[in-house]
Image (cartoon, rainbow, N blue to C red):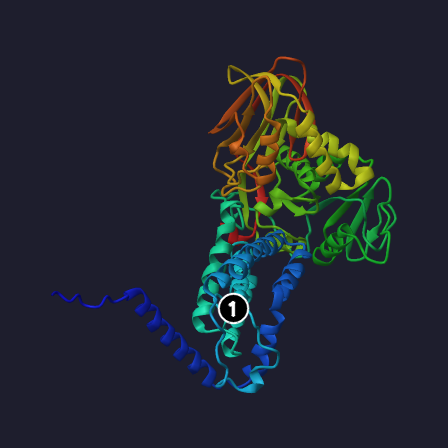
Amino acid sequence: MIVEPPRVDHGRGLLRRLGKIDRRAFDSVAAAHLPGLEYVLPRLSRAADHGVLWFTTAGVMAVSRRARLRRAALRGSIGIAVASPVVNIIGKQAFRRKRPVVDLVPPIRIRWKLPTSHAFPSGHSASAAAFAAGVAMEAPRAVAVPVAATAAAVAFSRVYTGAHYPGDVLAGVGIGMLAGLGTRLVWPARPPVAHVSRRTTRPVEITENGEGLVVVVNGKAGVAEPTAKGGRSKGGRSRSAGRQIPPGRGLVPGRTELDVAVLLREFPAAEIIRAGQDEDLEKLLDEAAKRATVLAVVGGDGTVNAGARAALKHDVPLLPIPGGTFDHFARALGIEAPMDAVAAYREGCVARVDVGSITSREGEDGLIFLNTASFGAYPELILRRRRLETRLGKWPALAVAAVRTLRHSKPIEMVVDGRKRRVWMAFVGNGTYGSRGAAPTWRDQLDDGRLDIRMITTGKRVPRVRALAAVLLGHLHITPGYQSWHGGSLELIATKGDLRLAHDGELSTVRGVVKFAKKPGALSVFCPRMQG
């Protein structure tokens, strides 16, 4: 008779050994005496209950004027929204591990009732890691590092207060990190700035007080302290082109008021022109560029586009100052607020960026674009939004316009680089863009010499439902008929009349043969030194 040796379950043996190590580690932390932390860590752990600490932090970041911080807040919150149900609904119910025995934990650390749910994995640690990972992918280091340190402190506090074993915390951190990093699958992280390799060789006169700097402000509100036409504001020359802009409509100053106040304080010798709503902005910019050493513009992408045309015409460097809704070009340079522009000017770092050009044999020509140009459904969306926003407001009008455009827009018959196509939506980017959504928003390089062309061509029917889903999910490439390529030029012929174009958020109509091309390194712009 042959007696078989008893089978050894190596998996269970490994788990028992890991459990012993985990309990010893817990006992070591429980026995540790860290002066001052007995009061700090329990309160920090309590503040993180139900994600209150992180959602409060996200709210503070969201109300800032920094696009990077708003993106970081949203990405971190999405990470928590993914990690929390994975841990609490799936993980805890699957493992059902009991909470630690807290006999060795000093009572001063256990200031509130201990949780009664299962221990593995730690939900607090998962939420902390998910939020920190999301913030780290978008926010500057000055914000990301303190958030990460706070997240680490919250994770450690769960062991220090007796709520979890170290293994619970490590598992929670791992799940949270995966959730935070996993947001890149549906929402790719963007670089903080787009790089520029070219630098201007012509010296630019930089003055501490802004002498020679002419600033054109395109906004609905003026500064808080009104001046007479052609008069002098406190701290510098400031005139209104035509109609005097009211100083504000309430106790709280508007965004434009605050921006102009910063410029008056930092550049007392600069000339600041506040354009009225009915003024010819292009004429004002042209006159300003004639006498400027440096031309600065405060406004959205359309205003910066007009400023770029004037700067190109008179060969002066451009200083873009964000003052619109999206401010794609200024933010690509790393300028997110007026003080960023002030720093860029004083550092004297001037780069040369590419400019996209649009020319036609008939009708309007000489158009440029610094970000993107488009034709097809997108110009229709902008037109509908403008009609609705006086009644609904900008963002509700945009949502309604998007739905109506996707429902009712029709393909345009045209010839694209010699081939007949029915184009439903098309974008031409000034440089290679990294985002894959319906409207590309960021790029790595501002002087790569290429056009990024994305187009949806269709047959007789437009796949509207699938297209709507692709737009909402930010994955336009899954739409049938989607094509993309890079090139130096694009030629169009609209076979049925005029062609409506959107370029940097502005609308124009062209006809005949339309050509998109590049002007490599044509525009001199100021950018922060970190940009290089």
Residue 438 seen in the figure:
no
Taking 519 as reference, is 494 above or below it?
above
**Image position of 93 (left or right of 231):** left
**Image position of 228 (left or right of 360):** right
Residue 113 seen in the figure:
yes
Taking 426 as reference, is 525 above or below it?
below
Using the rendered view, name the quadrant where residue 267 is placed. bottom right
For disc 1, the neighbor class at 10 Å (few under 14, some 14 to 19, many from 20) is some
Return the x and y of residue 198 as percentages of the image width and height.
48, 42
Q: Residue furthest front?
A: 1
Who is closer to the viewer here, 269 or 342?
A: 342
Q: Which residue lies furthest to the left in this view?
A: 1
Amino acid type for the residue under numbered disc 1: His
Using the rendered view, name the quadrant where residue 44 is placed. bottom right
Return the x and y of residue 434 as percentages of the image width and height.
50, 40
**Image position of 394 (left or right of 428):** right
Who is closer to the viewer here, 445 or 201?
A: 445
> Which corner quadrant holds the N terminus?
bottom left
Return the x and y of residue 295 as percentages of the image width and height.
67, 43
Identify residue for label 1. 118
Who is closer to the viewer here, 378 or 532?
A: 378
Using the rendered view, name the quadrant where residue 380 is placed. top right
Residue drawn at x 64%, y 65% as measured from the top left: 52
Q: How many numbered circles are shown?
A: 1
Who is closer to the viewer here, 416 or 99?
A: 99
Q: What element carries label 1?
A: loop
Residue drawn at x 73%, y 58% as measured from the top left: 265
Taking 196 as reference, is 33 above or below it?
below
**Image position of 403 (left or right of 431):** right
Return the x and y of residue 436 as percentages of the image width and height.
53, 38
